[in-house]
Amino acid sequence: MNPLSSLFSSFRARGGVHPDGRKDLSAEPPIRLLPMPPLLFVPLQQHVGAPARLSVVVGDLVLKGQLIGASGGNISAPVHAPSSGRVVAIGDFPSPHPSGLPSATVTIAPDGEDRWIEADVLDDPFSLSPEEISARVGAAGIVGLGGATFPSAVKLNLSRKSGIATLIVNGGECEPYLTCDDRLMRERADGIVEGILLIAHAAGAKEMLVGIEDNKPEAIAAMRRAAAGTKVQIRVVPAMYPMGWDKRMIQVLTGKEVPAEGRSAEIGVLVHNVATAWAVREAIRFGRPLVSRVVTVSGAAVAAPGNLEVPIGALAADLIKACGGLLSDPARLVLGGPMMGTQLPHLNVPMVKGSSGLLALTGKEIGLRVAQNSPAPCIRCSSCVRACPAGLLPLEMAAHIRAADLSSAVGLGLKDCIGCGSCSYVCPAQIPLVHYFNYAKGELAALEKAKLRTDATRKLADSRNERMARVVREREEAARLRVAKKAAAEAAKAAKTAAEKAEVVA
Amino acid sequence: MFIAIFSLTVLGGALGLFLGYAARRLKVEGNPLVEEIQAILPGSQCGQCGFPGCAGAARALANGAAPATLCPPGGREVAALLAAKLGVEVNLSEVKNAVPRIAEVQEDLCIGCTKCYKACPTDAIMGAAKQIHAVFREACTACGKCVEVCPTEATRLIPVPVTLQSWYWSKPAMQGTPA
């Protein structure tokens, strides 16, 4: 680092790393349509929140875009049929999740006609009220396509309530290998810009900023052309990881920082991904729910890497086949990017709304020989501290978590960790730092859940005790009444006999 | 006879009033810690800790006669809260080894005797006479009372099944030397 840049380093956003991009593998070929696979496996849980509630039965004929799972709660999203065909099975199927656990899945056999359900095509989507747009976005099952998969309509409603000044559309795509947003911006810039205008209309945002990393010049040019004459501003941001983190993007574009453990709405900013903007436009203008997405298929083990437009529910194996198959046995299969994605146990899992990439990586790419050495002791070099974009102390947090002292880790800001993996990436001792943090976050969530459960069961136990006491009380009362009644009857009988006797005597 | 009845009534009444007054005037404050501890415990009175119900366990905890990890249905969460309340150190890893469990009714063995749902302290079992019973997973604290009363051994405790919602990363394997 030369002295001048070190002088200015205090003005730059902190942390971050510069992994080898390897985007050239898949960036050039245009987006291709995946040939319709023989079966589509559509999970009912593809988003953050409650799973969708099943609304079809086995044997039903469905059209493309027909509802197969309704929204299951306040924070949930509906699921639609990705093609026309017949529902052939409903049941557990391996989910694209690191645990490999099964989840409730609707299996559809496409009939090959790919017929859309009748939709409401609008000439002027801007005539809709913001509430109507949010409702339609929710009904279309749109979730954050950057990977977070948070239901977009919930975000829009929240931002209208809290008052949003700025809409930031995230075209960062800082993960190595991934080029799906890059290709989308190059090929469908007009639609994305219209989607941005619709989101801004629905959220009530005055300012619209699109942040794109400077390693995508074609995308920047295409978006500039499309945005000419509109209020959408295209901003170029330096390429570094994790530029696509929403809070980092906000900081770079607006100079404002989201407070710790806070949300971007607190400083009047709403962030959506470019692919989400495209999906919003499809839903509002053409009435088409989210049933497909662009997925990057890449890695040195793939014969012809590229981007595919994939119906939700296509198997990873279908994507690999469409990209020429595998050149060698991959050392690792990854869903998403190599930094934050999850390892897949096999190719027999479906693509879902949040799947941005499918990577088949060779041993050389993941540095297998190096990785086989078990983690070495921490030498407290503090590389991770410099790399952490959230300004945390990964080495200290990991040490506390190792010692089962989670509350100290929380005190050090564990809840602000975004799991970006920058710390693990730079660690010379190869300590699985981000694994520690993911474990600790899961453990904390489980403890929280257990606490709620204990409270609920205590209430149940209390109400049962009360009920039992009441039953006993009522039984005693009934017995008393019975005794009193009997006594009264006997008294009456005695009186009657006495009266009869008296009569006889008389 | 009336004199005897009268004198004993007066005597009894006076003594009763005196005792009532004394009980109020000389009331011994219970240890407030016991009540606070009882509020933390699950309240299902299951007796798995070996004490007569949660109140007994709370008294034992307040006297220091029982460890903070005594409550199996409460699990780690309750153990941590108890340790914080009592100001003691507790090794949560001991509790951690006890996998959270819930009750299950094996349908092929259930004869619908209704004994288990009458015994359940949290109303977690649903059933009727001569009908197969079932367990509400969310309400079950795995206290084991239903297991004790079942005449056909149809109820048992099983580990809580892991789902996508409850799964999380396990703790990384220990390194040879401290991090």
Image (spheres, coloured by chain):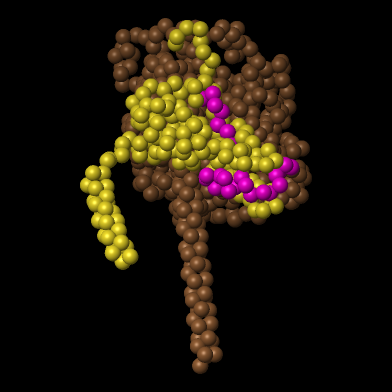
Chain colours: A brown, B yellow
Position of B83 compared to B174: left or right? left
Residue at (74, 36) in percent of width and height: A37
Tell which of A171 and A233 is nearer to you: A171
Q: Position of residue A286 (x, y in %)?
A: 59, 50
The relative height of residue A334 versus residue B130 in the rendered view (above or below) is: above
The relative height of residue A278 versus residue A212 in the rendered view (above or below) is: below
Residue at (67, 32) in percent of width and height: A94
Dominant secondary structure (helix, strand or loop) of the stretch shown in magenta: loop
Tell which of A214 and A44 is nearer to you: A44
Was residue B117 drawn as part of the magenta stretch in this picture? Answer: yes
Q: Position of residue A11 (x, y in %)?
A: 31, 21
Residue at (47, 7) in percent of width and height: B177
Tell which of B167 and A297 is nearer to you: B167
Farthest front residue in view: B1
Tell which of B123 and A54 is nearer to you: B123
Q: Is residue A134 visible?
A: no
Position of A7 compared to A420: left or right? left
Q: Is residue B175 visible?
A: yes
Q: Which residues are magenta?
A: B96-124
Residue A389: quadrant of the picture? top left
The relative height of residue B8 versus residue A234 in the rendered view (above or below) is: below
Q: Position of residue A32 (x, y in %)?
A: 67, 33
The relative height of residue A419 versus residue B176 in the rendered view (above or below) is: below
